[in-house]
Amino acid sequence: MEQDVKQFVGKKVTLTRNLPKPNAEGHGTVEMEGFVIEADMKIGVLFRQRGRTNGELIKPHEVEDIRLLSTAPKPVKVKPLKRMNLETVRQHLADRHGTSTEVLNRTPEEEAMKLHDELHATQGSKLAHSHGDKVTIES
């Protein structure tokens, strides 16, 4: 292993390890996913394999390759929020929907609730949150 392993400290990686003798399948190496705790190619790589609690020192001659583990971002989920009420709807429109505070400061609570209900009716599936029981104002 020629590359500088210090760059992998604190990162999730795939480590390819040379085995002293071929395993039962006849392979001379094994790939392991895990976390590099510490690394120095004079001493080796302190590696914690995924699913294990303790680290293991892998000697320099055993390290065939180390690659950063490609991690896809976690999917964003719709977050359930508390039920809307007249006292909080204007602040909610500012915080969660990006409505101008200048407009909201001139808008009565009942009108703000109607605006909020319209936003959820027209863009509901595109919003990053949902509400439990909705309070609507009848005209």
Image (cartoon, helix red, strand yellow):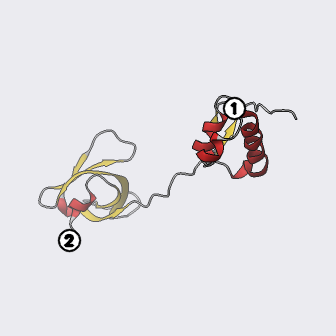
Find residue 84 and name its label: 1
Find residue 24 and name its label: none
Element under label 2?
loop
What is the residue that sits farthest to the bottom in this orientation?
A: 2
Q: Residue at x 19, y 63 (%)?
A: 61
* Three-letter amino acid code at the position of disc 1: Met
The image shows residue 137 at horizontal and vertical percentages of 81, 33
Please tell me which residue lies in front, 47 or 126.
126
Find residue 2 and name its label: 2
Please tell me which residue lies in front, 82 or 46.
82
In the image, taking residue 16 as reference, residue 104 lies left or right, namely right
Give the mark, 1 or 2, whose residue is nearer the N terminus: 2
* Three-letter amino acid code at the position of disc 2: Glu
The N terminus appears in which quarter of the rendering? bottom left
The C terminus appears in which quarter of the rendering? top right
Please tell me which residue lies in front, 107 or 39.
107
Q: Residue at x 60, y 37 (%)?
A: 91
The image shows residue 13 at horizontal and vertical percentages of 35, 57
Mark 2 is surrounded, within 10 Å at the Cα level, by few (under 14), some (14 to 19) or many (20 or more) other residues, namely: few
Q: Is 74 above or below relative to 18?
A: above
Can residue 79 be seen from the camera position used here? no
